[in-house]
Amino acid sequence: MKRSIFLLITAIIATLFGGMMLFMPDKAAEGFGMTSTLETALLFRSLGGLILCSGVLNFLVRNEGDSKVLKAIFIFNIAFHAISMTNDFIGVSQDILTFEKVIPGQVAHLFIGVGSILYLMKIKTSSN
């Protein structure tokens, strides 16, 4: 798959997940099997905003050539999705979340994280 298509798909996934969390925090909480409260809505909106912004960032660089900036964005993607996967697994291990409820997010995290690793390894930039 072309890198630009990967970044476009990444942007769409982030827009869908982030948009739902930002604009429909009650549905997001329900999707995770959590009771929606004012506190969870606040946190989901905050996280949704971050995820939505990551989608915008990936969309904006979809046609960027090899560069240090693109490397930095792929490193951000890898770190963000690794931390998010870890957090979901902690939630499952502490019986806060169920594995079935985090599967869609885990698939998205794996797609974006692994894809970002693969495309990061292909970037050629000068050492300057």
Image (tube, rainbow, N blue to C red):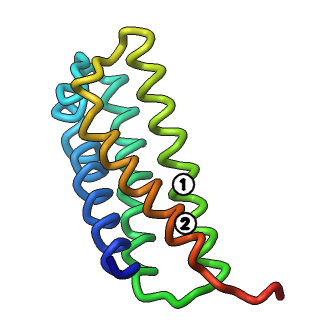
On screen, residue 123 above or below 102: below
Q: Are marks 1 and 2 in contact (CB under 8 Å)?
A: yes
What is the residue that sits farthest to the right in this orientation?
Answer: 128
Residue position marked by numbered label 1 in the rendering: 78
- The answer to which quarter of the image holds residue 39 is top left
Numbered marks: total: 2
On screen, residue 26 above or below 73: above
Q: Is residue 11 left or right of residue 28?
A: right
Query: Cα distance, mark 1 to mark 2?
Result: 6 Å
Residue at horizontal 31 percent and vertical 78 percent from the top: 5
Q: How crowded is the residue under tag 2: few (<14 C-alpha within 10 Å), some, or many (20+)?
A: many
Q: Nearer the viewer, residue 81 or 119?
A: 119
Residue at horizontal 21 percent and vertical 20 percent from the top: 33
Q: Nearer the viewer, residue 44 or 120?
A: 120
Secondary structure beneath dot 2 equals helix
On screen, residue 72 above or below 66: above
Amino acid carrying mark 1 in the image: Ile
Residue 97: x and y, percent?
32, 18
